[in-house]
Image (cartoon, rainbow, N blue to C red):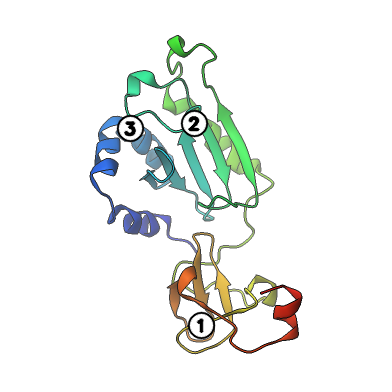
């Protein structure tokens, strides 16, 4: 089972000056998400956003009409998305709340509390919520279904093909328990029909 608080704590250890500045501007957003049970963190890749992990490992992202502005006075409104993971190619995306003001001079309007309430309501009925969580590096997925494995990838520790990718992009070996970043896993070194069919 995902320990979202631990996952977010690990992300926060890599904070730099930009993330700390964002906390000063949007600390109330982080507090509101965490008050609802969603450990939150600052995301600066591709623009400023506040992200939070749900208990099943899916992701809530608070932004505005694009990224959050560094100057809170320029916030045009709140936009909340729910996605499978923190990656550009996420398999699904739900727009949970979109209150970006048509007139920029109108400002943000409603408070973040309405956005968080929308997230809580949405998560109770979202049809896309993951049915299982595949874990953090080294964490057991608790499910040995072959369909959850990533064919064509082998563990760098024991050379086993029993590698599954997690919602956060880690590659966990089910044979030896090694957790590694997905980029550290190696592709099959031997030719096989399945790899050729999958164009790996």
Q: Residue 90: x percent and y percent?
A: 60, 51
Q: Residue 137: x percent and y percent?
A: 44, 71
Residue beneath the point at 55% across and 50% down: 88
Q: Is residue 197 above or below residue 84?
A: below
- Which quadrant, please, contains the C terminus? bottom right
Residue beneath the point at 27% across and 41% down: 18
Q: Earlier in the sequence, mark 2 or mark 3?
A: 3
Q: Earlier in the sequence, mark 3 or mark 1?
A: 3
- Mark 2 neighbour class, 10 Å CA radius: few under 14, some 14 to 19, many 20 or more: some
Q: Residue 189: x percent and y percent?
A: 58, 87
Q: Which residue is mark 1?
A: 155
Q: Secondary structure at mark 2?
A: loop
Q: Earlier in the sequence, mark 2 or mark 1?
A: 2
Q: Which residue is mark 2?
A: 66
The image's mark for residue 26 is: 3
Marks 3 and 1, Cα distance to the nearest angstrom?
40 Å
């Amino acid at each position: 089972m995902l320990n979202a608080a631990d996952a977010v704590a690990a992300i926060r250890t890599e904070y730099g000056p930009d993330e700390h500045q964002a906390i000063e501007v949007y600390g109330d957003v982080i507090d509101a998400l965490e008050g609802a049970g969603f450990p939150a963190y600052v995301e600066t890749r591709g623009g400023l956003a506040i992200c939070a992990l749900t208990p099943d490992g899916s992701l809530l992202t608070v932004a505005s009409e694009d990224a959050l502005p560094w100057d809170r006075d320029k916030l045009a409104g709140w936009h909340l998305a729910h996605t499978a993971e923190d990656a550009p190619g996420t398999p699904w995306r739900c727009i949970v709340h979109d209150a970006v003001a048509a007139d920029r001079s109108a400002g943000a309007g409603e408070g973040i509390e309405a956005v968080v309430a929308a997230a809580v309501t949405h998560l109770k009925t979202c049809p896309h919520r993951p049915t299982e969580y595949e874990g953090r590096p080294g964490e057991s997925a608790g499910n040995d279904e072959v369909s959850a494995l990533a064919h064509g990838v082998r563990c760098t520790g024991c050379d086993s093909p029993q590698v599954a990718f997690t919602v956060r992009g880690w590659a966990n070996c089910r044979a030896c328990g090694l957790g590694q970043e997905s980029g550290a896993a190696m592709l099959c070194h031997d030719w096989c029909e399945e790899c050729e069919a999958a164009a790996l």
